[in-house]
Amino acid sequence: MHTLLFRALPTALALLLLLIVATEYALARPSRRSANISYVPATDSSYHPERHLLDVYAPKAASPALRPVVVFIHGGNWNSGNKNFYSFIGRRLAKQGVVAVVINYRLSPQVMVPQMADDCTRAVIWTATHITEYGGDPARIFLMGHSAGAGLAALLTADNRLFERRGVAQNPCKGAILDDPAGLDMYDYLQKMQYPGDEQYLVPFGRQPAVWQEVSAYHHVTAQTPPFLLFVGGETYPSIASSSAQFRQKLTALGHHPYYQVLPGKKHVPMVLQLYWSGNIIYQELRRFVGVGT
């Protein structure tokens, strides 16, 4: 994760994503976007008028059956990022027959990671409740994320208690697609503090090791956890490469057979930018994973 990760995501990634978003409006889009839907009631004491919003991207083409659903959680080091940068992912997923939900959630320093996880949980609960209105199948909800968003996606998929605390007995997540995930085991990472600038992560994660463990998917996966797809950049940050490999090893030890692929030459930021192209390997495997056309 390194200090460089803090600099790269809010700057280079934001500029590149802005360029992609601008280009997107010049392209034909076979999808329908329903924008800025509140997934937390305005009467809620925690309500944030920008961060508690999501967008739904549904294919325009009619379908005789409900479509699989992918909820995308953006990255940004837990302190930056916005769903509006990722419209290209919503469009690409819809083009391939998926109903996509792209969400915002509250960020550090306003809140800490447990509150971010709760926001994402509430967005998934909204999806399970309302997605049939957009042609999506509430029985086929998958999570997807990049960087910090992938860490949150893994946590929601693994920790059923997040949903139980919100009164939902059955975790609606059927699996997760992790794109260069960060934060899979912050309990281990923050105890080591081996990279310059790591103290900055104490802002979103706090100083209590019990909390670090609580928000780390690595410590919640079981033999019953839904399946994962893991994609890791061949030139990503060493901490992401090593934690992803350890996550895979634990899943394998539990009896899972996770799809795991290292993409040669890819750094951390290009791992999400490649999702601009519908034919890339992540979308190819995602279509099989979520059952597009079934």
Image: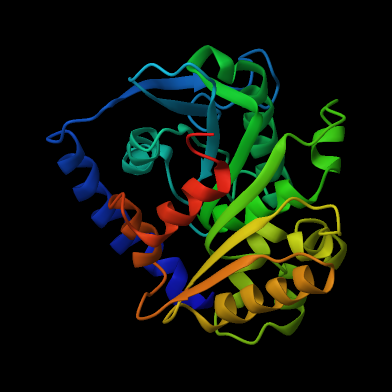
In the rendered image, the vertical position of residue 161 relative to residue 131, given as above or below: below
The N terminus, quarter of image: bottom right
Residue drawn at x 59%, y 50% as measured from the top left: 109
Please say whether residue 207 is visible from this viewpoint.
no
Q: 120 or 250, which lies in front? A: 250
Please say whether residue 106 is visible from this viewpoint.
yes
Residue drawn at x 82%, y 74% as measured from the top left: 253
Q: 222 or 75, which lies in front? A: 222
Q: Quadrant of residue 125?
A: top right
In the rendered image, the vertical position of residue 142 relative to residue 50, given as above or below: below
Residue drawn at x 17%, y 33% as measured from the top left: 25
Q: Quadrant of residue 61?
A: top left
The single residue placed furthest to the bottom in the displayed view is 194
Residue drawn at x 44%, y 27% as measured from the top left: 55
**Drawn side of residue 240 relative to residue 56, left or right:** right
**Drawn side of residue 28 relative to residue 291, left or right:** left
Q: 245 or 45, which lies in front? A: 245
**Drawn side of residue 150 relative to residue 218, left or right:** left
Colouring rule applied to residues: rainbow
Q: 242 or 19, which lies in front? A: 242
Residue 27 on image: x %, y % = 15, 35
The C terminus, quarter of image: top right
Count all numbered tags in the image, as a single digit.
0
Residue 51 on image: x %, y % = 52, 33
Residue 230 on image: x %, y % = 57, 64
Residue 282 on image: x %, y % = 43, 58
The single residue placed furthest to the left in the displayed view is 26
**Drawn side of residue 109 relative to residue 46, left or right:** left
